[in-house]
Image (cartoon, grey):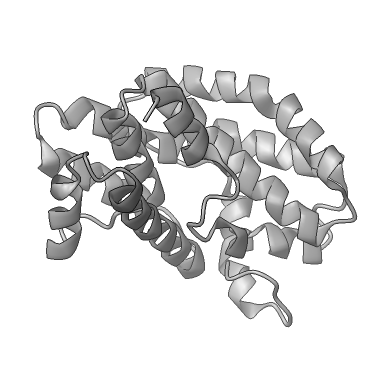
Amino acid sequence: MIPWLAVQQLLDSALPIGGFSHSFGLETAVQEGRIRNMLELEKYLGTMILQSWSTADAMVVKAVYETADGQDWKRLWHVERLVHLQRIGSETRSGVEKMGRRLLQLAVVIHPAIDWSPLQKAHESGECLATHPLVHGFICLRLGLSLEQAVQGYLYTCIVTGTGSALRLLSVGQTECQALITRLSPVIGQGWEIARELRPEDAYGNVPVSELYAARHETLYSRLFMS
């Protein structure tokens, strides 16, 4: 498949990996009145890019690129768990694992010529969790993308997931969400600049309120999303 088209497929919001079922705490923020409009959503997603997704999740993507060629799998699985265990909400941890597993299953089917065995065997043996950022990074590497493209692509998918949730949680339309994605594109570039300077083992998250939203989600009286 043409590489750049394969990437478009990977970043498509319609990719059937279950992202539409998860808000990762955004539903809690809306129900509690913390996010009421597109301006507040933009600030929230921008903060997540710069202080969570680029400093934590992107480190797993980066670890793939730093370890896969040398097959330093032990280090890669360590970084994945280091990042994953920082997620406080059990629903969030479960959601990131489910999306990753589904993405891996999909990749095996649509790209059968690529060798996925290192990831498949490690997941089957329990060495890795096959979380979403890990599988995303692995796919991008196998498709020949640069690390910069892989990280920026992952940050983009996070934004798309967030705006997709907003469509069902706020009184907003498709056009407003697409405009928001465009406005946040420069922030993705800033997120990459942050990720570029960090070591994967230095991964951290600095948006505690999002973790609280995620943890409180399971106690909401009514819920549209699984997380």
**Count of residue discs:** 0
- On the image, the x and y values in percent for residue 65 come to 26, 27
Residue 224 sits above or below residue 186 on the image: below
- On the image, the x and y values in percent for residue 180 come to 77, 34
> Position of 132 compared to 37: left or right?
left
**Could you say which quadrant of the image residue 167 lies in?**
bottom right
Q: Is residue 184 visible?
A: yes
- On the image, the x and y values in percent for residue 25 come to 63, 60
Q: Is residue 51 visible?
A: no
> In which quadrant will I find the C terminus?
bottom right
The residue located at (59%, 50%) in the rendering is 14
Which residue is at the far bottom? 221
> Position of 123 compared to 143: left or right?
left
**Could you say which quadrant of the image residue 217 lies in?**
bottom right
The residue located at (44%, 57%) in the rendering is 99
> In which quadrant will I find the N terminus?
top left
The residue located at (9%, 34%) in the rendering is 71
Residue 62 sits above or below residue 76 on the image: above
Q: Nearer the viewer, residue 148 or 60?
A: 148
- On the image, the x and y values in percent for residue 223 come to 70, 75
